[in-house]
Amino acid sequence: MQLRLISWFFITLNLMEYIGTQHASRVRRQGRMHPNVSQGCQGGCATCSDYNGCLSCKPRLFFVLERIGMKQIGVCLSSCPSGYFGTRYPEINKCTKCKADCDTCFTKNFCTKCKSGFYLHNGKCLENCPEGLEPNNHTMECTSIVHCEASEWSPWSSCTKKGKTCGFKRGNETRVREIVQHPSAQGNPCPATSDNRKCIVQRKRCQKEGKGKKNRDEKGKRPNKEESRETRQENKGRESRRQNREQRENKNKMQPKKRKAQDKQQNPVPISTVH
């Protein structure tokens, strides 16, 4: 029984020495890899090196390696730069580079913007769009093909010929419609927006412009004739009254002369004698 206890004691002691040796060797390896590790770093670094920059980041910051010539420097950022996507782990938050044809991405397999020459479709960058879709060179995406749409035809217009609606038997009538949806680059083109056809109407004469004018003039002259007749009657009455007035004035002028003549006849002037 004592021998068994002694053997367990030596086994436990050897195991503790082995664990201590492994820990010491791990510390020595880390010291050889980063001889200038510092705890007082700037720029969001938790640990850093004079040669490699940041080695670890403060909480919620992303660690990313930036290449400067042949050298890579670790930096800590609040968000990943263009061309990278961020992934959070319990130990460290890392920025991982997107695929070669992807400019910006959400994950490694989901791109949000493609590089020049590629079109985005369902998170992937394609050189050619699938069937039923067309490339949009403005957004650099694969979009649905849009066909042209037109409204219903309007009612037929009146039957006309050379701008007139009378004086003919055969003419033309038209109808129109509007474009309500213009097509995309590969969509069906728009149809015609106007249509015309021959038409037949019951022929009727057009009212002559000169005859109508003459009738209007005659209608306008009638009140003028009546007015001139009334004017002549009024002028005639005025002239008659003037003549009567003149006759009365002349008669009044003649009466004193007649009276003088009568007085001379009744009372002749005595002839004077010369002494």
Image (cartoon, rainbow, N blue to C red):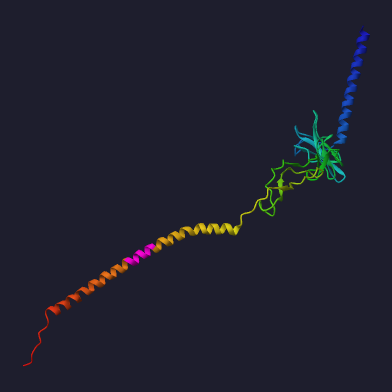
Quadrant location of the N terminus in the rendered image:
top right
Instruction: Answer whether residue 252 is magenta in the image.
Output: no
**Image-based side of 200 in relation to 97, left or right:** left
Which residue is depicted at the point 86% across and 34% down?
A: 31
Residue 208 placement (x, y as % from top left)? 61, 57
Residue 230, quarter of picture: bottom left
Quadrant location of the C terminus in the rendered image:
bottom left
**Image-based side of 50 in relation to 272, left or right:** right
Which residues fall within the magenta stretch?
A: 233-240
Is residue 94 depicted above or below 211 in this figure?
above
Instruction: Report whether residue 254 is seen.
Output: yes
Residue 61 placement (x, y as % from top left)? 76, 34
Is residue 167 depicted above or below 252 in this figure?
above
Which residue is depicted at the point 26% across and 71% down?
A: 249
Instruction: Report whether residue 53 is seen.
Output: no
Q: Nearer the viewer, residue 96 or 198?
A: 198
Residue 227 placement (x, y as % from top left)? 43, 60
Which residue is depicted at the point 88% across and 20% down?
A: 16
Q: Nearer the viewer, residue 47 or 242?
A: 242
Which residue is depicted at the point 58% across and 58% down?
A: 211
